[in-house]
Image (cartoon, rainbow, N blue to C red):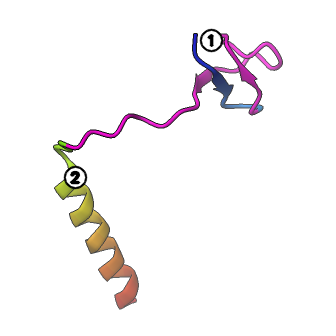
């Protein structure tokens, strides 16, 4: 069982549905890091382009 957090009210629970408000819950921990990031170069390229665009304006 893993800790989950309600996306509506922010309460923590182990259930799939929040017992406080009935909202959907999701996992609280970040996704695992993989050294072999297949899409890393595209993410870095997008980040560079966004930085260049924001600095140019």
In this rendering, is residue 40 above or below 52? above
Q: On the image, numbered disc 1 is attached to which residue?
A: 16
In magenta stretch: residue 18: yes
Question: In the image, residue 20 lies at what x, y percent?
Answer: 83, 18
Task: Return the residue nearer the eye: 11 or 55.
Answer: 11
**Label placed on residue 40:** 2
Question: In the image, residue 19 lies at what x, y percent?
Answer: 79, 13
Secondary structure of the residue carrying tag 2 is: helix
Distance CA(mark 2)–CA(mark 1): 32 Å
Residue 7 position by quadrant: top right
Q: Mark 2 or 1, which is nearer the eye?
A: 2
In magenta stretch: residue 20: yes
Q: Looking at the figure, which quarter contains the C terminus?
A: bottom left
Secondary structure of the residue carrying tag 1 is: loop
In this rendering, is residue 48 above or below 15? below
Residue furthest out toward the front: 35
Q: Residue at x 26, y 73 (%)?
A: 49
């Amino acid at each position: 069982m893993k800790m989950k957090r309600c996306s509506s009210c922010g309460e923590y629970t182990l259930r799939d549905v929040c017992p406080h408000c009935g909202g959907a819950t999701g996992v609280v921990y970040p996704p695992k890091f993989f050294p072999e990031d297949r899409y890393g170069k595209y993410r870095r390229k997008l980040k560079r382009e966004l930085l260049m665009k924001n600095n140019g304006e």
